[in-house]
Amino acid sequence: MFNIVIFGAPGSGKGTQSDLIIDKYKLIHLSTGDLLRKEKNSGTELGKQIKEIIDKGNLVPNEMIQKMVRKFITDNKNCNGFIFDGFPRTTAQAQWLDQMLDEINTKITLMLTLDVDEEELKKRIMLRGKVSGRADDANEQIVENRIKVYKKQTAPVMDYYKQQNKFYIVNGTGELNDVFDRVCLTLNKLKN
Ligand code: AP5
Ligand code: MG
């Protein structure tokens, strides 16, 4: 399997590039943010708990994420590979993912980080906030909190993959297709 962790700060383009990658490399897209928003909109008790957390830009507890991801991986375990978007978001999640993949005899091939500066991140998210309907896009303080949470709790995940020699970084600014070309250059080197 070809398993990619697509990584980067909020607004760095993980979802946008994932859509292009799954098409070209025939992978399955696992976005924990998308799964959480689906649950949130379903109006269940769990959905209400999730809303409380994500609308403030904080992280949902690991147990909730692990349950969701386990089901998703198990349901799709015969695919060509996964692209993990927005997950793992903590080192504990990264360790757990390695164990989970081991159960189905596969592993992460690489982590690909999209590098975008903070001003550009805020600009992109605030622009999308005008139309996305995402409560966490609409307010500058919440966007700033998301970036703060990323720096503190999520950025250390890069070290986890650096230690495994699986860390790659590309410039995530510029035209969407130019970013995709850079992404493909890296992926093609590692795809067998
Ligand atoms: P999640 O949905 O993962 O959101 P995020 O990481 O904050 O990032 P975004 O989805 O907003 O940005 P993106 O990097 O995908 O960029 P995109 O392609 O959309 O998580 C949401 C929340 O869920 C979290 O805050 C947390 O509460 C919870 N959560 C999720 N996973 C969790 C986990 N594992 N553990 C705990 N909690 C979790 O692009 C952004 C915008 O920029 C778009 O409008 C796009 O059109 C535009 N754009 C893209 N590329 C370019 C470009 N090259 N030039 C100009 N504009 C561009
Ligand atoms: Mg996204």
Image (tube, helix red, strand yellow):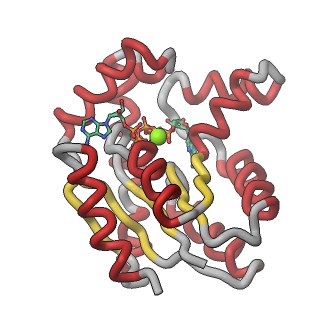
Residue 169 sits in quarter: bottom left
Q: Residue at x 37, y 49 (%)?
A: 152
- Residue at 46% of width from left, 52% of height from top? 18
Q: Is residue 151 left or right of residue 23?
A: left
Looking at this view, name the residue that lies furthest to the front: 24
Residue lying at 82% horizontally and 23% vertically, measured from the top left: 44
32 lies left or right of 114:
right
Query: Is residue 182 rendered to the left or right of residue 56?
Result: left
The image position of residue 159, as x and y in percent, is: 36, 71
Could you say which is closer to the camera, residue 92 or residue 188?
188
Say which of 77 and 25 sits in front. 25
Which residue is found at the position 59% from the left and 71% from the top?
A: 95
Q: Position of residue 15 (x, y in %)?
A: 45, 44
Is 159 rendered above or below residue 177?
A: below
Whether residue 188 sits left or right of residue 4 in the image: it is left
- Quadrant occupied by the N terminus: bottom right
Q: Position of residue 114 (x, y in %)?
A: 30, 55
Residue 179 at x, y percent in the picture: 25, 53
Q: How many marks?
A: 0
Q: In the picture shown, does residue 64 fall above or below 146? A: below
Q: Nearer the viewer, residue 2 or 69?
A: 2
